[in-house]
Image (cartoon, grey):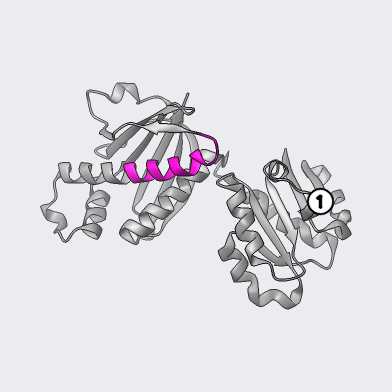
């Protein structure tokens, strides 16, 4: 069951009656009543800010770390010009405070959709991986990518795709694996180095893949360590005929991404 907390919205307690049939548990609190432990108990945090408090949203998003929690900010009508500031600070949804109780239903339904990709719910690992991929691709190759699907599946590699894996040991045990087509790997290299794509061979792409999976896994590790999931990573290695039996067929969570040109790649993770 999803759990929502409405902060500084005690004057809208009629909202709770709208969601009981939908399986949403609703609590009303003031900001002063919330502790760090209370905040992380909720999937949806909705807060009404009568006065400009963008810094509060920065603080709230940092406090929630990479938990899959949706932040909704309700503002007075006259603050409509500042919506983008709150989105930049970490809010997922920003709306003017609805005049009618019934008008909040589509906002909460939208929030609940943020917690799902495909047929699965985002968890802390998937959320951290998604943000790590966004950061690595944006900073390293200036290429925005989009998470298109999240699914539970047995690990398999498509055709001649490249795959690199890093084992995970510690509080989390398993592996993180990245798969991509050779042509897309060559494109990534060309974004980093002044080389002709036609001069690249399979070994070049494999080395680049090592760098990407290492950065993504390391970036994810830094996020999850702050989330009390401490673990260590092995060196990346290519998935090949010698070792693939250790991984192929494992039940994994797969995050499927693509860029604006519809080039695709997949991040798999498996934790026992």
Whether residue 160 is situated above or below residue 154 in the rendered picture: below
**Residue 139, visible in the rendered structure:** yes
Residue 221 coordinates in the image, percent (x, y):
44, 40
**Residue 92, visible in the rendered structure:** no
> Pointer 1: what residue?
29
Is 218 one of the magenta-colored residues?
yes
Residue 5 coordinates in the image, percent (x, y):
76, 49
Is 100 one of the magenta-colored residues?
no
Q: Specify start and end residues of the magenta stretch as a single range.
A: 214-229
Q: How many marks do you count on the picture?
A: 1
Asked where in the image residue 203 lies, by quadrant, the reply is top left
Identify the residue at image location x=36%, y=49%: 264
Identify the residue at image location x=75%, y=75%: 77
Identify the residue at image location x=22%, y=41%: 206
For the N terminus, the quadrant is top right
Left or right: where 104 falls relative to 111: right
């Amino acid at each position: 069951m999803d759990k929502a907390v409405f902060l500084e919205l005690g004057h809208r307690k009629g909202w709770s009656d709208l969601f009981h049939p939908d399986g949403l548990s609703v609590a009303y609190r003031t900001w002063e009543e919330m502790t760090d432990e209370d905040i992380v108990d909720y999937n949806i945090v909705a807060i009404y800010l009568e006065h400009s408090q963008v810094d509060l949203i920065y603080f709230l998003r940092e406090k929630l770390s990479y938990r899959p929690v949706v932040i909704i900010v309700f503002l007075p009508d006259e603050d409509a010009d500042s919506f983008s500031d709150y989105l930049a600070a970490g809010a997922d949804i920003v709306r003017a405070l609805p005049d009618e109780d019934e008008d909040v239903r589509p906002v909460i339904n939208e929030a609940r959709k943020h917690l799902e990709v495909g047929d699965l719910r985002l968890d802390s690992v998937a959320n951290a991986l998604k943000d790590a991929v966004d950061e690595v691709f944006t900073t390293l190759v200036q290429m925005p990518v989009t998470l298109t699907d999240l699914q539970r599946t047995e690990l398999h590699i498509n055709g001649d795709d490249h795959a690199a894996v890093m084992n995970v040991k510690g509080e989390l045990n398993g592996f993180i694996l990245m798969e991509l087509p050779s042509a897309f790997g060559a494109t990534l290299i060309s974004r980093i180095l002044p080389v002709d794509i036609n001069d690249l061979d399979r070994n070049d792409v494999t080395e680049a893949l090592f760098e990407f999976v290492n950065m993504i896994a390391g970036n994810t590790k830094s996020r999850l360590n702050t989330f009390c999931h401490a673990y260590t990573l092995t060196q990346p290695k290519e998935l090949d005929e010698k070792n693939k039996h250790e991984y192929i067929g494992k039940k994994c969570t797969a995050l499927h991404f693509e860029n604006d040109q519809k080039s695709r790649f997949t991040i798999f993770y498996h934790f026992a």
